[in-house]
Image (cartoon, helix red, strand yellow):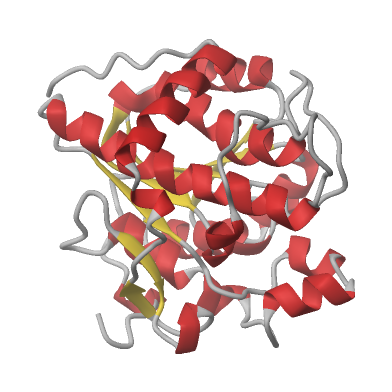
């Protein structure tokens, strides 16, 4: 995959791709590329007005629908309103290093928006996704620890550690989903990706010293940061359980390559426990149908 770019995206005509958080940053860039390659792109966005502005600037077939991952009622309404099958689901939307707060359903904002919302959405759509589920994590998952206190009620809140916890949860989910898809005999695969250090809206808002230290230097633009996501979503030969990130030093920048995640992210016991808890918290129980 050396030097793989958006120009290498295969023809997407006849395919439907659902991208969450498609109104800005990596989601908007992925929408532009995939719609330009012929896909019908469903843009699941909390800010539909901003999404429509983006969609109007894109050549290709786009469809804007409201989706707030911080509100499980919105997730259910979105899933209920979708028609037909989906070839690729890209769980891209999320929040980054935000102050302490809760979602509509009372979850800490990072774990609620970045993990529980996508967990519920994928569970509601899993039998309609034919090709791939792509979950966007971060190199900062290495900061994360999955604790019983997911909501940070009994420990001092630290926003970057809360973000890291949610990104570790993303990887645990992606790998466990692959195991369950395989056990059900499904050809659909679950893949994870991370963009490295990319100039997204969330990173631009965080101008703190801590944020600059964690980011670790100058960010690459969305047109580069999106490449691991696109590779995971459409490149031939991607396997279930793969994790795609940039090929540069410490996987912070560069072209897509397969990368290795932390030992904690590959803990099958932890993944199963988080899965069970996520089903309980969201009320979404997976019933993966063989195909």
Question: Vertically, is 6 above or below 206?
Answer: below
Is 290 in front, or is 248? 248
Among the 4 quarters of the image, the one containing residue 117: top right
Which is nearer the eye, 285 or 36? 285
214, 69: nearer the viewer: 214
Residue 48 visible in rendering = yes
Determine the residue positioned at 57% across, 37% down: 115
State whether residue 275 is above or below residue 156. above
Left or right position of 131 against 243: left
Horizontal and vertical percent position of residue 53: 74, 52
Of the pair 1 and 106, the residue shown nearer to us: 106
> 35 left or right of 85?
right
Classify residue 202 by image quadrant: bottom right
Q: Is residue 40 visible?
A: no
**Residue drawn at 30 percent across, 58 percent down:** 234
At 70% from the left edge and 47% from the top edge, which residue is drawn?
162
């Amino acid at each position: 995959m050396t030097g793989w770019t958006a120009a290498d995206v295969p023809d997407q005509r006849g395919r439907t791709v659902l991208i969450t958080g498609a109104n800005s940053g990596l989601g908007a860039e992925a929408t532009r590329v995939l719609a330009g390659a012929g896909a019908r792109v469903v843009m699941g966005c909390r800010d539909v007005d901003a999404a429509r502005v983006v969609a109007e600037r894109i050549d290709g077939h786009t469809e804007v629908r409201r989706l707030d991952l911080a509100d499980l009622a919105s997730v259910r309404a979105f899933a209920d309103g979708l028609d037909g099958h989906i070839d690729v689901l890209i769980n891209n939307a999320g929040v980054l290093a935000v102050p302490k707060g809760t979602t509509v359903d009372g979850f800490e904002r990072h774990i609620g928006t970045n993990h529980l919302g996508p967990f519920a959405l994928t569970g509601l759509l899993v039998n309609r996704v034919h090709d791939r589920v792509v979950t966007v994590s971060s190199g900062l998952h290495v900061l994360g620890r999955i604790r019983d206190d997911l909501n940070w009620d009994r420990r001092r809140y630290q926003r970057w550690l809360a973000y890291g916890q949610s990104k570790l949860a993303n990887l645990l989910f992606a790998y466990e989903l692959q195991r369950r898809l395989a056990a059900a005999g499904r050809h659909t695969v679950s893949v994870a990706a991370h963009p490295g250090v990319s100039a997204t809206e969330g990173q631009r808002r965080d101008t703190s010293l801590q944020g600059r230290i964690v980011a670790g230097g100058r960010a690459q633009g969305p047109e580069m940061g999106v490449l691991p996501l696109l590779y995971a979503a459409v490149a031939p030969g991607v396997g279930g359980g793969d994790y795609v990130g940039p090929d540069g030093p410490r996987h912070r920048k560069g072209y897509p390559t397969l990368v290795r995640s932390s030992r904690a992210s590959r803990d099958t016991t932890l993944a199963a426990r988080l899965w069970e808890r996520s089903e309980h918290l969201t009320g979404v129980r997976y019933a993966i149908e063989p195909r």
